[in-house]
Amino acid sequence: MKKIYSILATLTALMIILGGCQQVEDLTPSLSRYGINSLSASFYGDESSENNFSSEIDYENSTITLVFPYNYPRTSNNVLTMDALKKVRVVANLDDNVTISPALLYMDLTKENFITITDQTKTKKDYKVVAEIRKSAEARITDFSLNSLGISGIIDEENKLISLISIDPIGEVLAEMSISHGATINPDPRNTALNYDEDVTLTVTAQNGIDKTVYTVRKDVPNKVERGMRNGSAKILWTKKLQSDLGITTLHNTTSLAVTKDYVVVNTRNEPGMLLDRKTGAKVGTMPNMGSIQGGLTNFFATADDADNILISNLAPNAGTYKVWRFKGVNSAPELYIDWSASGSTAIGRKLSVKGNLDGDAIITAALMGAGKSFARWQVKDGALLSQVPEIIAINGIEGAWNNNADIVATDPTDLTADYFVSYYATPRKFAWVDGKTNTIKAQGPEISGNWIQNSADYTVFNGNPYAVNMSINSFTWGSDDKVYLHDANAVTTFTEPIWATPIGTYGGKDNGGTNANGTGDSILKVSNDGYYMYLYFMFTNGCVVCVQFDCIDM
C-alpha cells in the first residue's frame, strides 16, 4: 500500500512540474486596425440637437476632416464661416488601450492641427486634423401635395416615385412641396402649373450643385400591405428640444400636445399654445386668443379631436371646479365646453383624451386622481355634448393607487361599451387593454419598472389594424429611461409586447433640458387623410417633442 501511495505522489509531482512548463497565455490585447474610429466636434454652450459634427478619416494619407454644414442651424440662411471654428470642442472615439496626444479639449480649426495615436503595441501614427465647411449633398423631395385639390403625394423614396391618389382628372395645377435645404428643383412645380394627368419628371439639385435626384410624379393609387403598417417603415421625421430648439425656457410646465390637421400644438402652462408645423416641426407661431384662459392651473392640459377642435382643461380642485374649453381651430377664441360645476373636491385635469369628432360623435375621458382607479367620461352625439355631468367608471384589475398618474383613451367614438386603454403608475405596472362591457383588464403589455412613471395613452386604427401607444418616464436625476412603446392591438396575443419602441436615455428631460421632476409627457397617434401614413407624436417634459412616421405602402 505504501508503495502505491509513493507512486501516486511521484506522478502528482510530475504533473505539477509539467504544468509549470506550460506556455504562458498571451494577455496582450487584440490589435485594432487603426486605433481611432472617429472624431466629432461641437460648439461650446450650444444645446441644439444639431450641434454635433462628424468627421471623415483618410487613414492612408493620415488626414481627418471635420465636416461642418454650409448653413448653421442647418435649415437657416445663416452661412457658417471659418471664423466660427476658432474654438471647437473635439472628442475622439478610440479603440481599447489606444491613447491620443495631445489630450483633446478644444481646437482652433482655422489652422491645421496634429494628433498622435498610440496603439496597443506602442506604435505611433500622426494625423492632420482639418475642417471643411461643406454644402449639403442631399437632394430630396420631402413633401409634395396639391392642396387646391386636397391631394397629398405619397413619396416612395427608394424608387424615387411620388404617387398622386386620384380617380378623377387632375389637369394643370400648382403644387406645394418641400425639398432639401439649399436645394433647387427643375421645373419648379410651385411656380409652374404642370399637367399631372401625365407622368411629370422633377430634378432636384443639391446645395452643392453636384448631386442630383430625379423623381417621377404619377397619378396612381399605390398598393398597400395587406394589413397595418409596413414592417421597418418607422422613420423619425423630426425632433425638437423644448428648450434649445423651441425656446421654452420654463421647466416642468410643458404638459401636452394637441395635434390638428396642420399643427402640433405644444401646451405649456401659463403660455399660449406653441404651433409647430406638423410636417417639419418648425415653430410657426402661437395660438393668438388663449389669453383669457392662460394660467398656471387653467391651461393645464390640451388635446385635439379628429376635426381640428382643441380641448384645454384646468386642474381641479386646485383651480376650482373642473372646466374644459373648446377652440374651433388654432386661431379661434375659447368657448366653455364642459363645466362640471359639481366636481367639488374631485381631483381631475392632469390628463384628458378625446376620440372622434366634436362636430359628430366623440367620447371624452379624464382620469380621476387618487386611489379609486376610476375616470370620468362624457359623450358627444351628432355634435352635441349630452351632459355636463360625466359618468364615473371604475376599472377592475389594477391593484394599487395610481395617484396623479393615469390616462385613459376610448377606441370607438360611437360606443360607450367599446374597449379602452389605460396607462397608469400602479401595480401591476402594465399598459392595459380594458373590456368596455365589464371594465375589467383583458390584456396587458410587459411590466415596466416601478422606477419609471406611466401616464400617457393613445389609440388609432391604421390600414385596418388597431394600434395603441404608451410611454414610461424618468423623474429622477439618476438612471436612464424615457421610452415610448407602440403596441399592435389587433388581438390580445399581439398586445403583450411592443412592436416598436424608442431607445432609452435620448428624448427625456434628464438627457436634455433638465430632470422631469413631475414625470409628465404625452403621446398622440394620427393617421393621414389618404390613409397611407400613421404618425406618432410624443413629448417628454423638459426633453423633446418628436414625430415618427409609419407607412403601409407595399414596396
Image (spheres, grey):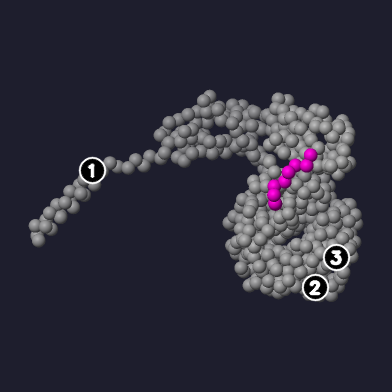
Q: Which mark is residue 380?
A: 3
Q: Which mark is residue 391?
A: 2
Provide the secondary structure element on which disc 3 rests: strand
Q: Is residue 118 at all visible to an observer of this figure?
A: yes
* Magenta region includes residue 226: yes
Picture quadrant where residue 26 is located: top left
Q: Which residue: 87% across, 41% down?
A: 168
**Depicted 394 relative to depicted 270: above or below:** below
Q: Residues within 10 Å of mark 2 (few under 14, many from 20)?
A: few
**Where in the figure is residue 400, as x and y percent of width and height?**
64, 72
Q: Which residue: 79% across, 68% down?
A: 416
Picture quadrant where residue 367 is located: bottom right
Q: How much space separates mark 2 and mark 3, taking CA atoms?
A: 13 Å
Q: Nearer the viewer, residue 176 or 149?
A: 149
* Magenta region includes residue 478: no
Provide the secondary structure element on which disc 2 rests: strand
Provide the secondary structure element on which disc 1 rests: loop
**Where in the figure is residue 87, as x and y percent of width and height?**
64, 35
Q: Which mark is residue 402?
A: none
* Residue corresponding to mark 1: 21
Amino acid at the residue labelled 3: Val
Q: Nearer the viewer, residue 518 or 353?
A: 353
Amino acid at the residue labelled 2: Glu
Q: Which residue: 87% across, 57% down?
A: 327
Asked whether, in this view, residue 160 is left or right of residue 320, the answer is left
**Where in the figure is residue 135, as x and y percent of width and height?**
70, 29
Q: Which residues are magenta?
A: 220-228
